Amino acid sequence: MHVLEIRRLTKKFGDVHAVDQLSLSVREGEIFGLLGPNGAGKSTTILMIASLLPMTDGEIRIFGRNIAEHPKFAKQQIGLVPQDLAIYEEMTAYENVAFFAGLYGLRGKELRSRAEEALAFVGLEDKRNRYAKTFSGGMKRRLNIACAIAHRPKLIILDEPTVGIDPHSRQSILSAVRRLNEAGSTVLYTSHYMEEVESLCTRIAVMDHGKVIAEGTLPQLTSVVTDRREIVVTLRETDRVKEDALLDIPGVRTVVRDDHRLLIETDAEVNNLNAVIRALTASGVEIADIGTRRPNLETVFLSLTGRSLRDD
Ligand SMILES: Nc1ncnc2c1ncn2[C@@H]1O[C@H](COP(=O)(O)OP(=O)(O)OP(=O)(O)O)[C@@H](O)[C@H]1O
């Protein structure tokens, strides 16, 4: 059964194709990852799924029903955790969750027990009476999640829920997502952190410029680049790097600068590490660290687009 089906979804902002003929399906029970760099179109896609932004073209179905024809049904099935916090600073944690649960039609005893349950889910039960304005960034993100899940939605959509928060809150959020999934919710999770998507998601769509450029399980996605390996060099500064010299080395396919790192995609069977080190030192750069790694989602993105996922 498909919880979500998107067909040829398009959103234009003037001349910008934020989402461009995007099609994908999410099956019941999945944690489906939407991975892409900033500006790929993830948030725009999610806002259209949640009926918060009109689409330019295309179709979205939730449990087989077109959301344009069944907006109320669609809304009941979805719990949206938006990227921008949607909580009230002047209300307590409990009041926030109860308010959103009320918007979804919960009342009385049921509302109270579901609100408590949602707070416990994100580990905020002992902070229930504290005002949201006193919370840390990570606690606000967790409260944001509690607000979206009290009505027990079948599809939970989280838009980059771990951006800019402390490691403890990040782990707590990832664990809450796993437990929500184990308790029966299907999850659509967007991120530009490849490590999160790799460890959390059962299936992944890689997005770039409003389109899905690859889709599958992690082994399926990385199988297209098993003949590759990545040399990751950390440098004191990348100004002096001569990309042409690196690209002349046998086996080297692409060279991408990513902040203070150089990502060099190379054929797996060619032993060219020494040649890379020689080329770098010859151009006068100082190597802080160098290593190789097997293909991961970043390699997949690099080989498909010639850019780093963190090229933002
Ligand atoms: N309201 C808007 N008006 C004009 N352009 C927009 C609007 N919202 C988004 N865009 C543009 O659409 C494209 C996709 O943006 P979107 O926010 O969906 O990307 P994203 O993958 O979610 O990235 P981020 O991680 O930065 O949120 C970008 O080029 C963005 O500038």
Image (cartoon, rainbow, N blue to C red):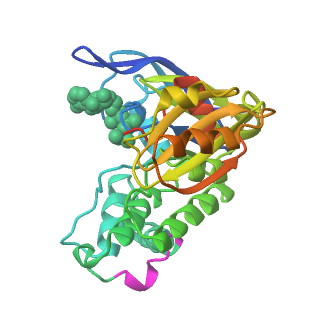
Q: Is residue 95 above or below residue 214?
A: below
Location of the N terminus by quadrant is: top right
The answer to whether any part of residue 213 appears in the image is: no
Q: Position of residue 184 (x, y in %)?
A: 66, 53
Q: Residue at x 38, y 67 (%)?
A: 143
Occupied quadrant, residue 312:
top left
Quarter of the rendering containing residue 37? top left
- Residue closest to the eye, 104 or 154: 154
Q: Residue furthest bottom?
A: 126
- Give the x, y percent position of residue 287: 52, 54
Q: Outermost residue toward the front?
A: 282
Q: Name the spot of residue 39 as percent of width and height, x first.
A: 36, 33
Is 183 located above or below residue 252 in the figure?
A: below
Residue beneath the point at 41% across and 31% down: 40
Viewer-side residue, 46 vs 198: 198
| Image: magenta residue range | 121-128
- Which quadrant of the figure shows ligand 1? top left
How many numbered discs? Answer: 0
Q: Is residue 191 left or right of residue 84?
A: right
Q: Nearer the viewer, residue 44 or 264?
A: 264
Residue 222 is one of the magenta-drawn residues: no
Q: Nearer the viewer, residue 107 or 83?
A: 83
Percent x, y for residue 153? 51, 50
Relative to 278, does residue 110 appear above or below in the rendering?
below
Res 118 visible: yes
